[in-house]
Every structure is written in structure tokens, then in C-alpha cells.
Amino acid sequence: MNADTSGAPDVAGTPDIAGTPDVAGPPDTPAVPDTPEAPHAPRAPDAAGALDRDKLFAARLHAARVRPYLATALFALHAVESRRVPTMAVDRYWRCYVSPRFVDRTSVEELAGVWVHEVSHLLRDHHGRSDRVAREQGLTGPAERLRMNIAADCEINDDVFGEGLHRPEGAVMPETLALPEGELMEDYLRQFRLGPRTQSLAWLDCGSGADGLDREWELGPDGAYGLSDQERDAVRFRVAQGITARPGNAPGGWRRWAREAFQPPQPWRDLLGAAVRSAASGSGAGEDYTYGRPSRRSAGVPRAVLPSLRRRPPRVAVVIDTSGSVGDDELGSALREVAAISRAVGGRRDLITVLPCDASARIVHPLCRAEGIPLVGGGGTDLRTGFARALRRGPRPDVIVVLTDGQTPWPSERPPCRTVVGLFPRQSSSSSWDEDDPDYVPDSPPVWARVVVIESTPATR
Amino acid sequence: MSTHARSRATDTPATPPHPAPLDVAGALLALLRDTSTEPRPDIQLEALTLAVAADLPVLLWGEPGIGKTAALTQLAASLDLPLTTVIASVHEPSDFSGLPVVGDDPAEQGVPMAPPDWAVRLVRAGRGLLFLDELSTAPPAVQAALLRLVLERRVGALRLPPGVRIVAAANPRASAADGWELSPPLANRFVHLQWTHDHEVVVRGLGGTWPRATLPRLDPERLPGAVDLARRAVCGLLTARPGLVHRLPSNETRRGGPWPSPRSWEMTLCLIAFATAAGSSREVMSLLVRGTVGDGPGLELLAGLDRIDLPDPEVLLADPQSAALPERGDLRQAVLDGVVEAVRKRPERTRWEAAWALLVRAVETGAPDLVVVPANTLASLRHEDWDVPASIDKLAGAVSLSRRADRAAARTAVAAPAGR
């Protein structure tokens, strides 16, 4: 494994040693003088078809220089020579299988692109996500896995190349399949079938690291140089941290990945449900113990004082800010969710009040009629009036649930009941989180409210 | 009934005796229960055992019906502790905080808070494993009473002896019917372990062979080293990242989970020491650490542990010929960078030459591209009067590699405007 480097002191003459360091200086002073030497010339033609490790590693070095934030991950890959792979492939244990013939016929800059492509499969956990999709949707069989590989390639290829990194010949792009750019593997997977368009991709094989299907030529979990779960997480974490620490030089796709790598977005339904449930069943609201009336057990224990369980269904007031650019379907499903949760914790229909904070409450009316929720009030655009009206009503609510896009003044004081805010991210704010408008700061809900961000897209990742 | 059956059997000896229906059922049940066990590593159980051994309250999060109770039964058996299971949801708060019993003269003697029988038995035994199951379905007042039991180890007027270990179980928020959720101060006191089932284990178990985990044993000889390592790891990280000492969970996703604070860092320190003394794998340590301070800080700590495991640059410089460099590329590069950094801090000729010898060794035993950056930096540290060691010839491969990468970069730069 080591004979190649010491045994083949190639080209450009063994540099005179004193000069060595200066020539191989920083990457921004490339040693152009000796470019005439043909880049594709097979060097050190020892055993025919042997892996040209120098070329392979020169490509990795190039990749690490143009993508410094991926260097840790690139160097963590262990290269394994394999004649069974068409090009390069990775397995889930961070081994990279390399075809010697592919290395021979590919230029250094294209190889660098392939390195980055393969390591992206691993960083983005395509094998784990493929397994999840396969399990959830019952997609089994090599054809489905090929589809996953193609979808994963689309997710990677639309934003990793360029800026010093060459796009390899024949890389699958979303437009190859007539699909839009910038989506996730799971989204692409829904949008195409194997057919004429993908005919040319049938040979494509990025290994089990890309689609989760074990290949017989892989070394498997017990082979040498595999990374354990924890080591893989550690490498991914270091890369994510490097990107979040210096977000300037990473493209948007990678920054999004780094944000979500160890904090995947959760389905808002679960979060909103948990928030409302815990607010409605917290002490002081709903069910609780009291010493007001003797317990059923009292007869058995004559001298002890036993408390008994009293139940008071929670009163929930839903304040809806309909002034924003909130879609009817989003609002409808959020409201229905709140109603369902309130019923689940024992609320009755007459204990749920809905207070729309705008004139255009067209969606709220039909929904509430369908749900049998009494609709009170109308008019007004300021959420503070919504709060005030909710609190002014007869028996005070135990929980106020606010559905809003957040572009509104908030009460300056904490209301005397629990508050849950379902926040619809504004279309403009969701895309301006970085460069569009660096000064933009959305009005954030106050700290005393529990905030659940309601995304319109289902968070499948 | 049975005599009647017997008398009939004697009447007609040709037909076999009718056994009682339940006897047949019993025989079938016996067959079904006749299962064997096989040894199998189980990192969840290992992590649980270590946390219990370290006397930290553990909270198992898991969907209903995936074997949390079975795991606890096995743990109690192997630790030789009597298991007391208390299903929280069928109790009242007074069962945990004590029932007021009105005596003869309450004004004079006060009203004692009587503990329930299981607590009395636990205290009498002096040791045991208390399993608080179904925390998630208990009403809030019961949960509040239970948390006092978990945190202060008090049941009414009784204090649980130190030999009693406490484990709780809860269903995840999404599947809990009435929203059990820990407030941040309470979440901070638990070691959170996510309990999942292993598909293979379940299938094999239903086929008749259940796993038998070999539990970690603490090695008495490793104790001082384990404490030292744990202190170095935690202090090293917190020195470099003061912001990690205390960080309240800010977003909804993280609520109710582990988060870093001085208290949870102390628990982490303790758990690292236990895992090290038991010789546990990094996976086990990862479960424990991430379950105590959360994913982000936990992963940083684990990454720091990886670095602590790396060879010391000074040791490598002292004897470059027998140096063992890590196989993994990224770690190897970290080591080489460390060596060069050490030379930069104290530039002496012998150290500089030793560093070259190390780089040569790295080129001979692994991927050459890792050596390029350290070699450049090391070369820039050269003093006027230092001669270049002859062994540097062997780095020629790495140098040409670097040039090739440079040329590729130049070509890409030329091609880029046309290509994009």
C-alpha cells in the first residue's frame, strides 16, 4: 500500500530539497511552469491497470482545497481499490471503492468532483434516508434503490459543483429528468419513474452509501477501516460545525444541511399538539387533585385524609390572525389540529372559542361551522385586541392558542394563562434568512409564549 | 368435577383420560415459554447499567410495548437487586408524598405523612431497583409528586436508602396521550436514554432465542485513569468553549430533552469515568453523553475525546521511528498538524528533523495527500542554518501530488468562466 509513493519519484525531477517547500507553496500560487506535461499521461505505468493512487489523492487534495469545509470528511474516507465498481462508490462505513480504470481515464479535476459527490452522499445520510423511505413506503428491490440513488444524486449535483470544482462527465442533474432544482432526495423520489429518461443511468452505482442497498463487493460492517456509528456522527458533526462557524464560504445547500444535520425539523403537528396538551393539562388547568370532597378510598382508611380527583375540562381560546399571507389550507389544518387536541384532553366543544382577528375570516367561518365551534367577535387587526377579548370573556380561558404569521404587535405583559403560538413563517422571511436582507429582523413572539413554527411543507427529513 | 372425570376414566379404560382443559393449555404455554438465550452485545442495556451503577436517575424514552420493562427485569436480575415496579398512572399524589394520618392529638404531635407499603419495604431491604413506569400517563399532580421522589429520594417521611436506584420510563411526547413533558430544570436532572427495539433481536426472540447481554464490569485498576480522562475531557472542552457550560434549550424541538448545565456536566464527567472504567465502547459513551448534555455539546465532547486519544505530539517527536500514526485520514492529519504546531512553538533543529521523519513515515504508511499541508508549514519553519534532512527525498511523491492538484485548480479556474 505504500510502495507507490516512495517507489515512483516522478516527473519534474525530484525537486531540489531546499526548494521543495517554496514550490509547493499555498494553493493560490499554482506551479504553472510545468503544465505542458500532459495531464492525462499515464504516469508510473507499473502493473497495467493498477490504481494510480497519486492521481486519486491529488484529486482529493484539490477537492479539499476548493472545499475546505469538507476536508475532514474527505480525509476520513478510506480508499479501497475495486474492479467491481464502474466509477467510484461509497459504503455506509465510509469506505470509498475506486475503479483503477476510471481513475486512469478521468482527469484530476473531474476526480475531485467525484470525491466531493461521494462524500456528500455520506454527509447527507442518503443511506439512512433511503432505508427510511424504503421502510415507510415499502419500496424494495434493486430498481427502487437505483431510483433512490438517482434522486440522491440530483439532490447533491444541483449545488456542489462550480466555484473551482469541475462537474464530472455524465453527472445526473435534475434537469436530466426534467425536474426543478434545489429539492431534497425524498421530493425527487416522488417525481420520476424509471423509464426512457433514466435509461442511460442504469449503470449508475454510488454504492450502499447512497441508497442503502448492500452490494456483494463491499467489505461490510466487519471489514477493515470502517467507521463506527459514533465516528461517522463525529465526522459529520465536525463538518457541520465548520460550516456553521464560517457560513460565508459554503453554498446555501450546505448551510441548510449544517443547520439541520443534528437538529432535523420536526413535524409541527406533534410539537403543536404537545404544546397545547401540556398547556391544557398543566397544573391549575383541567384535571387535578383537591381535598374539597372526600376520596372514594376514604372508607377503607378511616383515619387518613385522602384527596380526590376532580376534573375541570380546559377552556381553550384560539386567536387567529388572518391578516397575514397565511394560506387557507394551512390555517385550516392548524385550527382543526387545535380543536382535535382540545377534545383529546377532555375539552368540550362549547369550551373552545375561536376569535378571528381580521375581517377576512372566510375560512374560519365554514370551518367552525363544520366543527361546531361557536364563533365570537370579528374585526380588528391587532393581536393585542385578540388577547384582550379572549381574556375578557366569561370564564377565563386556561389556554390561549394564537395562530399568526408573527407580523403584529404583541401584548407587553404576560397574560394570566398559558399561551401557545403557532407561527406561520412568512414567505418573504423564509427566503431572506441570509443575503437578501441582512438587516431584516422579524418581530419575534414574546418569551412567555411557547412557539411552534408551522411549516407548510411536510418535514420528512 | 375432577372426581367425576376420574370415575368416568375408570369406567372406560380404552379411551384416554380427559385431562382438564387448562392442563393442556398449560402444556402449550410451557412449550411456548421454553426459550433459550444467547449472548449478544446490547449497547442500550450497557448504557443503562452504567448510569444505574453511577446512581444517576435515568429516564427511558420509548414507544409503548418495546421491552423497557423486560430490560429492567433483566438488569435487576443481573445486578442482583430486587425490582419494585410502580405504575405511576394508577397512583395518587399522596401515594408518593405520603398520606396525612390524623393521630390522637394533631396539634401536639403533628400529622405524620404515612408512606405506602412498597416504600416501607424498599427502605427495610436497604437496596433495590425502583422502576417508575408510565410516567407519561400520570396526571400532572402525580408527576409533580413523583419528581420529588426522584430528585430528593423522599417518600412521605421516609428517605430512600442510598442502595436504591431509580429508573423511570416515559412515552415520547408525540405518542403520549396527555402531554407529559419535562420542564427544563427537571429534564436537566435525568440521563435520557432513547429506548428502541432491534428488529433482528425481536424476530430472533420470537423464534425462541432471546439475547442475554453481558453487563459491563468496572475494572478496579482503571479507576484513577478513568477519572483523570473524564476530568481532562470535560474541562478541556469547557475551557475552550465557555458558552457550553450553561445553555437553556431555546426551541420547541429541544424541550424536555437533555441540555448542558454545570449539573449535567458533572453527571457527564461521572458517566465518562464509569464508561472508561468499564472499558465500554464509544457507542455506549455516546449514548450516555448525548443523553445527559444533549446532541450538540455531547458530540463536541466526544470529538474532543477522539482527540485526547490521539498520540501526544511530544511523544511522537521524541521517537519518530516507532511512532504509530492513526489509520483514519482525518485523525492522521490532525496528528501531523499537531506535530508541526509543537515544532512551531519550540523550534529546535532536532525537533524539526524529527518532524520530517514523522512526515516521511506518514507518507510511507498512508495516503500522501494528508502530508502536503503539514509539509508546507514545516518547511516554512526552517532556520537559515538548518540543513534539510536527506530523508525528505521520500516526500517527493507528495510534492508532485500537490503540484498536480495546483495544476488541476489552475485548469478549473481557466475553464470555469466558460463552463458556468
Image (tube, grey):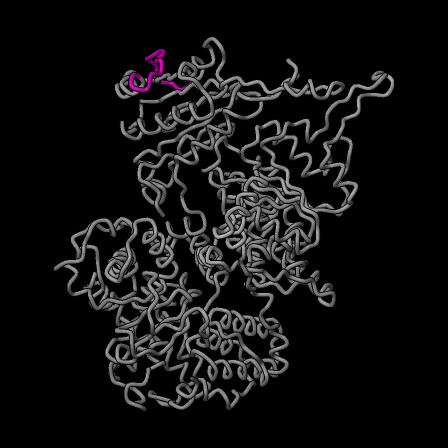
Does the magenta run of residues contain A283?
A: no
In x, y percent, where is residue B96?
A: 68, 31
In x, y percent, where is residue A159?
A: 28, 56
In which quadrant will I find the C terminus of chain B? bottom left
Nearest the camera: A193 or B420?
Answer: A193
Nearest the camera: A437 or B366?
Answer: B366
Up/down of B207 relative to B137, above or below? below
Counting labels gives 0
- Seen at 30% across and 30% down, the residue is A330
In x, y percent, where is residue A225?
A: 46, 73
- Res A162 visible: no
Does the magenta run of residues contain A372?
A: yes
- Residue occupying the far right of the picture: B108
In x, y percent, where is residue B66?
A: 50, 47
Nearest the camera: A236 or B409?
Answer: A236
- Seen at 53% across and 88% down, the residue is B389
- Residue occupying the far top of the picture: A394
- Seen at 39% across and 33% down, the residue is A442
Please name the predominant secondary structure of the magenta segment in the image: loop
In which quadrant will I find the N terminus of chain B? top right
- Residue B145, located in which quarter of the rendered image? top right
Horizontal side of A130 relative to B293 (left or right) equals left
- Res A236 visible: yes
Horizontal side of A440 relative to B201 (left or right) equals left
- Residue B151, located in which quarter of the rendered image? top right
- Residue occupying the far left of the picture: A196
Up/down of A455 relative to A252, above or below? above
Nearest the camera: A89 or B35?
Answer: B35
Residues in magenta, as a range:
A369-384
